[in-house]
Image: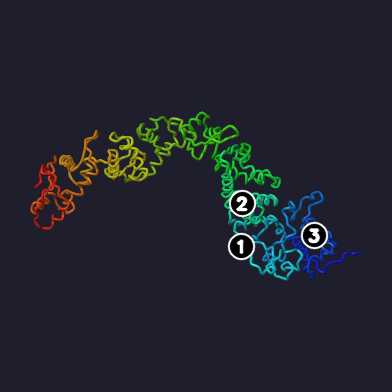
């Protein structure tokens, strides 16, 4: 008896679902359900509910070559009956779902068939239209069945396109697009809006990708405190978040898992994170293991740079460590990195020049050095100068250069701090740092009288090493302007003289406890410098003798300036002379404070600040005495 043939027998699409093809075959031949097609092929009911559907029977009634249907079949060969497949991808039967259909109605409408990737358990949404998959009829609300009249028609007669599906995030869409493209053998997408490691993922086989998504989603939910992680929808959502902005969120997952570990957790990092480590790097589902190397590199990044509570297995570092800059080092590794003996590292740790912590390793302890917090350079190839030779090369005194090095103004980047001397690369870097402040120009000689050379300042004997260091810092930070360079050397830098003297005086005043020199007071009050001692004797300024001379307190200067003003400053602002202003004061009855001075012109005149308004009023005023009775020279 011959097998009856269908009237219409369209060819299956290369990426079509096998069950979707039977449904399309049934719809094209006018049957109300694929049951009719299966009965026509002589297939029993139980044959249609497993991944082991015999495509030979279907091929006969569809008048198609067996090879066409075998390409989209689910069953593996007889030698691998425990495995399933999807468009040639080897999978575990649990990765597939052939009894509960789901789909994107818009995709089916546009393509005219159901793609095979919808059989995957993890395919919970459509990456093309960024919406959740449809699994229930929008009209009757019952779960979809493969035994219905058409691709987009429910058994109740409802149109599957009538429903509105919830949207999904960009990260979920990007991850599901990677899975879809892997199933359908499509190229890597040009865009990567969610910054997923999509190039690495698509180099993996389909089963490995599904295992990674399951593992990351499960452990993200565990780290969040969830007790149920069998929800495929949530697994995709959480896994896409972990893979987004690679590898930042992946490292954050391990950090969050680490926060749930006991504080006394001992051993290596791999042992501490054994659950997720085994699932990602030891599971039989992820093969070949080299495909997961990008995950191992990110794990090493976490272990060596973000987790300071355990050591990293040397074997793992040996295989992949060259791709990761290591932050946490053992004492031996740190000694090797900076090129010194372990005894030297021990001294550096003891002096706290290198940051370290102790971690348990079984019953013993290990020291982990935080390389990011240890600014210890290695000795670079090159000549190392003695102190005097380096100072001569720089145009500084030997004592000042040592002081600058100790204060960090002179930076050491090419020499271990345990070694004496000055490396030629550090010397040249410091010279260039100074020379770039002012390039050499021919016009420098024209302003030499208004400037002071840096060499004169640094080699002078009047200021302390601390003041010289502060001057150099001010030059480097542009607080003292550099207007030129006399000879193209650091010592030839020409500093603005007024700015230099003002800065040095401020430094001296601060060093003297906010007290000023007589010269500075005279400039502030606009008077002769020899007048200041007279003001001190009159009790109008507070001063004291120091080892470096008379110093006037800044507070007393401010009090005096609020009460008195020198006639010299008034004359200067009015474009006249002090003598003329003194005559004007006598004519108008304005009392003057005449302070004795050693200058030839006689005593220095001051008036009370409140009387300044009477100078040009033209009215005679009789004012009371403004100074103590024993004050000299009140007229």
Which residue is disc 3 drawn over?
48
Please name which of the two marks, 1 or 2, marks the residue nearer to the observer.
2
Front residue of 150/451: it is 150
The answer to whether marks 3 and 2 mark residues whose Cβ atoms lie closer than 8 Å is: no
- Quadrant, the N terminus: bottom right
The numbered mark, 1 or 2, whose residue comes first in the sequence reads 1
Q: Mark 2 points at which residue?
A: 226
In the image: residue 245, left or right of residue 588: right
Q: Nearer the viewer, mark 3 or mark 2?
A: 2
The Cα–Cα distance between marks 3 and 1, rounded to whole angstroms, is 33 Å
* Residue 137 percent across, percent down from the top left: 69, 66
Measure the alpha-carbon separation of dots 3 and 2.
37 Å
How much space separates mark 1 and mark 2, taking CA atoms?
24 Å
Q: Position of residue 398 (x, y in %)?
A: 36, 31
Question: Which residue carries the number 1 mark?
Answer: 167
- Residue 501, placed above or below residue 87: above
């Amino acid at each position: 008896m011959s097998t009856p043939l269908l009237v219409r027998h369209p060819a299956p699409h290369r990426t079509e679902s096998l069950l979707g093809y039977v449904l399309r075959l049934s719809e094209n031949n006018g049957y109300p359900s694929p049951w009719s097609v299966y009965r026509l092929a002589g297939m029993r009911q139980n044959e249609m509910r497993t991944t082991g559907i015999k495509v030979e029977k279907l091929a006969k009634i569809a008048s198609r070559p067996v090879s066409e249907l075998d390409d989209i079949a689910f069953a593996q060969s007889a030698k691998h009956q425990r495995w399933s497949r999807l468009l040639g991808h080897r999978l575990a039967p649990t990765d597939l779902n052939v009894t509960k259909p789901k789909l994107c109605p818009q995709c089916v409408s546009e393509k005219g068939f159901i793609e095979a990737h919808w059989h995957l358990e993890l395919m919970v949404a459509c990456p093309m239209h960024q919406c959740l998959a449809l699994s229930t009829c929008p009209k009757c609300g019952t779960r979809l069945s493969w035994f219905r009249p058409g691709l987009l028609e429910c058994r109740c007669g409802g149109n599957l396109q009538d429903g509105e599906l919830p949207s999904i995030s960009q990260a979920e869409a990007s991850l599901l697009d990677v899975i879809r493209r892997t199933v359908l053998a499509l190229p890597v997408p040009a865009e990567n809006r969610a910054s997923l490691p999509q190039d690495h993922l698509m180099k993996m086989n389909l089963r490995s990708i599904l295992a990674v998504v399951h593992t990351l989603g499960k452990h993200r939910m565990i780290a969040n405190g969830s007790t149920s992680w069998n929800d495929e929808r949530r697994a995709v959502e959480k896994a896409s978040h972990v893979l987004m902005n690679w590898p930042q969120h992946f490292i954050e997952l391990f950090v969050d898992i680490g926060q749930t570990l006991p504080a006394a957790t001992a051993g290596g990092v791999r042992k501490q994170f054994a659950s997720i480590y085994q699932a990602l790097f030891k599971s039989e589902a992820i093969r070949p293991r080299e495909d997961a190397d990008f995950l191992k590199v990110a794990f090493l990044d976490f272990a060596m740079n973000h987790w300071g509570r355990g050591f990293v297995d040397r074997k793992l570092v040996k295989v992949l460590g060259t791709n990761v800059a290591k932050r946490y080092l053992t004492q031996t590794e740190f000694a090797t990195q900076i090129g010194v003996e372990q005894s030297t590292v021990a001294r550096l740790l003891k002096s706290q020049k290198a940051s370290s912590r102790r971690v348990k390793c079984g019953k013993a302890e290990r020291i982990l050095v935080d390389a990011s917090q240890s600014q210890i350079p290695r000795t670079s190839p090159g000549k190392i100068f003695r102190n005097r030779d380096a100072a001569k090369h720089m145009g500084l005194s030997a004592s000042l250069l040592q002081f600058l090095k100790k204060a960090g103004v002179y930076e050491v980047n090419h020499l271990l701090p345990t070694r004496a001397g000055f490396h030629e690369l550090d010397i040249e870097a410091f010279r260039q740092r100074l020379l770039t402040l002012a390039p050499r120009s021919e016009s420098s000689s024209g302003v030499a009288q208004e400037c002071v050379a840096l060499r004169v300042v640094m080699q002078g004997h009047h200021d302390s090493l601390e003041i010289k260091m502060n001057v150099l810092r001010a030059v480097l930070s542009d607080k003292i302007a550099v207007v030129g360079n006399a000879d193209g050397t650091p010592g030839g830098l020409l500093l603005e003289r007024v700015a230099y003297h003002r800065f040095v005086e401020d430094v001296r005043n601060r060093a003297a406890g906010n007290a000023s020199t007589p010269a500075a007071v005279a400039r502030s009050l606009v008077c002769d410098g020899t007048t200041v001692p007279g003001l001190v004797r009159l009790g109008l300024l507070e001063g004291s003798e120091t080892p470096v001379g008379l110093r006037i307190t800044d507070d007393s200067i401010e009090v005096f300036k609020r009460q008195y003003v020198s006639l010299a400053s008034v004359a200067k602002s009015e474009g006249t002379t002090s003598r003329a202003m003194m005559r004007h004061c006598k004519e108008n009855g304005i009392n003057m404070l005449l302070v004795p001075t050693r200058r030839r012109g006689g005593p220095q005149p001051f008036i009370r600040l409140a009387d300044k308004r009477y100078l040009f009023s033209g009215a005679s005023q009789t004012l009371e005495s403004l100074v103590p009775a024993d004050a000299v020279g009140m007229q």
